Amino acid sequence: MTIPVRFGPYGGRYVPETVIPALDELAAAYERLRDDTDFKAELASLLKDFVGRPTPLYRAGRLSEKLGGTTIYLKREDLAHTGAHKINNTVGQLMLAAKMGKARIIAETGAGQHGVATATAAALFGIPCAIYMGEKDIVRQELNVVRMKLLGAEVIPVSSGSRTLKDAMNEAIRDWVTNVENTYYVIGSVAGPAPYPAIVRDLQSVIGREARRQILEAEGRLPTELIACVGGGSNAMGLFAAFLDDGVRMTGVEAAGEGLDTGRHGASIERGERGVLHGSLSYVLQDAYGQILEAHSISAGLDYPGVGPEHSFLHDEGRVRYDSVTDAEALAAFTMLSQTEGIIPALESSHAIAYMVKHSDRFTADDLVIINLSGRGDKDVHQAARALGIMS
């Protein structure tokens, strides 16, 4: 099966000509290796013994009771090595980089989880690694910065623009254009130029394959709805991919930030328009002149003014519903899950929980819901505590 370059009108390669040979090289390597028996066996072994898969599908009994009796399961990606779903992708891409003989790894990060996961995989394969991270995110994700440095990665602060994920990705792309022959760029989401959106989707689809098998074993039927947060959208695509041919409702939850009408949000699908960002055509936040707007979210991983092209396609096709919740709603859900189930979620994942809280009246006791708990909240506890007034 050929790797898709576009999803409907979305995707493509809007990049400098100097990068096209590197994208062709990557696509050819992935095409050759993704069905290779040895490659698949090595990846499966690493996912099991290094990443810790399969992650549990946990029935959140107290949360289910609190929200009206709908049966809610949490796909526990927070229990994967490094504390989030990001490691599924980076282990696979580092395997590709090693097979391609690349001598250097670069990546961008917002919440720091992709940076930590890339640094972890780079250490595993013994390849030097540099991580670009916005100065604003460095401050609010200090723990993950320390983790990246302990793992041997160089963390490069980005002071341009909004000093967040968008700008970190800009700088990583500039680095890659300059050093394209010996450098492998590990993109962390289902964004960027082809073939990255398809590669990341495929590597994250282990989430959905496991969840599908686990829910059938636990309940004897498929879920009625899947819910996942969406920034670039890799954890959501990872969950959704295995269910796209089923009659399962799916909801992607974007960041409404301080409110959709304030302009301080990250709801690229709800309030964006078609445009080009970081090498692909998708829904983006932009002004009347096509200039990319600054996004906002309390969660660094959702603080991004674009979304993966496959999400844009699924929105237009009506296959996936996209909605949004505010910072305040996400914080309330962060607290609720912590105190109801003894699980402190990442602020990104709290958006998915918050959607369920906000719309619990839409569900019945016969519904069966899977929420992707894409990461744990260790990295966010100080920021959340300040926002909640628990500490100064």
Image: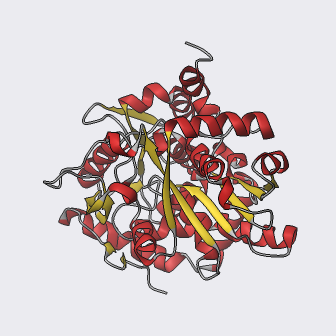
Could you tell me residue 83's position as x and y percent? 65, 43
Residue at the (48%, 51%) spot, across then down: 324
Structure colour scheme: secondary structure
Instruction: From the viewer's side, name the closer residue of 8 and 225.
Output: 225
Decide: is 315 above or below 144.
Answer: below
Instruction: From the viewer's side, name the closer residue of 206 and 256.
Output: 256
Decide: is 358 above or below 322.
Answer: above
Could you tell me residue 137's position as x and y percent? 43, 32
Decide: is 113 above or below 13.
Answer: above
Could you tell me residue 55's position as x and y percent? 75, 56
Q: Residue furthest bottom?
A: 1
Task: Judge from the rendering whether residue 174 lies leftward or rightward of residue 387; answer left or right.
Answer: left
Instruction: From the viewer's side, name the closer residue of 80 and 58.
Output: 58
**Quarter holding residue 100:** bottom left
Specify whether residue 43 is in view: no
**Quarter holding residue 334:** top right
Q: Residue furthest top?
A: 392
Decide: is 184 above or below 300.
Answer: below
